Image (cartoon, rainbow, N blue to C red):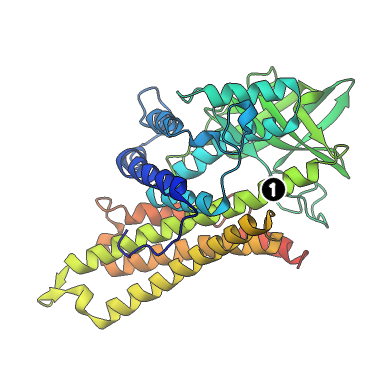
Amino acid sequence: MSFRDIDILPDETSRAIIKELEKFTATVMRPAAMELDKSHAPAEVFAETSPLWNVFSSFRGLDLHLTGIPEALGGIGHMDAVTSVMMAERLGYADAGLAIGLTAAGTPFCLAAQLQTPAMEALARNFCQDREGRMIGCRSLGRRRKTPAGGNGTGTAGPSPFLSAREDGSDVILSGKLSGIVNAPIATHGAFEVILSPERTGLAVIPLDQPGITRQTPAVVVSQKSAPRGSLRFEAVRVPGECVITEDNTSLAGIRETFTAGLNLFLSGIYAGTARAALDEALRYAKNRVQGGVPIFEHGNIRLQLFTMFKMVEAARAAALRLAGYQDRQGTAGTWPHTVAARCLAVEAACQVTSDAIQVFGGYGLAREFPLEKFFRDARLGLVENGVNEDLAIEAMLEG
């Protein structure tokens, strides 16, 4: 990273974690991401010989998949939020797609640990022991609006991020289709929002080898190609009731709030990292590209543009780290509007900084020999994934 880091990590353990993670992102994650971005078909990304599998297994080798799972089940408990955000930055600096995929891979198992049933705790325990990356999760977890607008409980147009559910004795029957799910083509388990009635929702953690679940052909995408995405169709899928936690359980609200706040905070770090990577590429290029007999960095307008980019990166990073610091001190996440603001700011900064970096590069900014055009494509997807920024903002203001 080009600018001197003035971040203050909580302790020596955190510093060691970040140091090891930086080695992983530089030597394993970024090279794999660049190779995966060259794929011509979605299936190439998760083919048997794909570098994607080395990313998953190498990440598991760092034991970072154990975060969020209690020590009694083989995990390492919750990591402090500041270290978590700095981890997200490093992952996003290497590749936003892989960063999101690695995060989604552990979600069902972290939630399973909180359901506190023998089967779910066994699932979390098995995940902790998986060092090869054989158990991979996906998720479709959202947040209901206070005032639904579309009748499907989401307040959004287009496909619902929820599955419909009905209780049948001690089992639950799930139906519906989920689209654009990260890791769907390769996931062994999923964590999903379900609707049992207009006023009653829940969370389901289920294996994806159940009868009635089909995976549809992944769509060809140009953004975050390193994260395999696809659709899942559920046709009267019967799962045990212990796989579903409903609003009858008083802990559901807390679990949902903690997850959504943590997801927004982690996404803030990821996209701040992407913005920082683009800034570094632009700064490096400006100091080496000679025009008019001097590096273009010597031109005042270029330095001004670079500093404007630097301000945006630091603003996005500061917002995420401020929330993380609050969470560590107060023991609770910031309000929904605060976490949404940090996330939206980071994504918008990533889009603007990558675009400005292309201006610094000129025509070379769109050349495949440089990673910048990839950063631009990856950042743009952030404006619409896991909730469109404008939709999230409107929802957040309901709680302002």
User: Which quarter of the figure is the C terminus placed in?
Assistant: bottom right
Q: Residue at point 36% right, 40% down? A: 24
Q: How many marks?
A: 1
Residue 222 visible in the shown view: no
Which residue is located at x 31 percent, y 52 percent?
A: 371
Res. 128 visible in picture: yes
Q: Local crowd at mark 1 within 10 Å, few (<14), some, or many (≥20)?
A: some
Under tag 1, what secondary structure? helix
Please identify the residue farthest to the top as the structure is shown: 211
Which of the 4 image quarters holds residue 326? bottom right
Which residue is labeled 1 in the image? 258
The residue at 39%/75% (across/down) is 308
**Quadrant where the N terminus lies?**
bottom left
Q: Position of residue 168 (x, y in %)?
A: 88, 22
Q: Amino acid at mark 1?
A: Thr
Q: Residue at x 39, y 43 (%)?
A: 21
Q: Is residue 18 left or right of residue 266?
A: left
> Residue 67, how many percent across, how many down?
56, 38
279 to 299, vertically: above or below: above
Left or right relative to 387: residue 359: left
* Relative to 190, 304 lies left or right: left
* As drawn, 334 above or below 368: below
Q: Position of residue 109 (x, y in %)?
A: 62, 31
Q: As drawn, which residue projects farthest toward the front?
A: 12
Which one is nearer the viewer's eye here, 389 or 252? 252
Vertical relation: 193 (above or below) 366: above
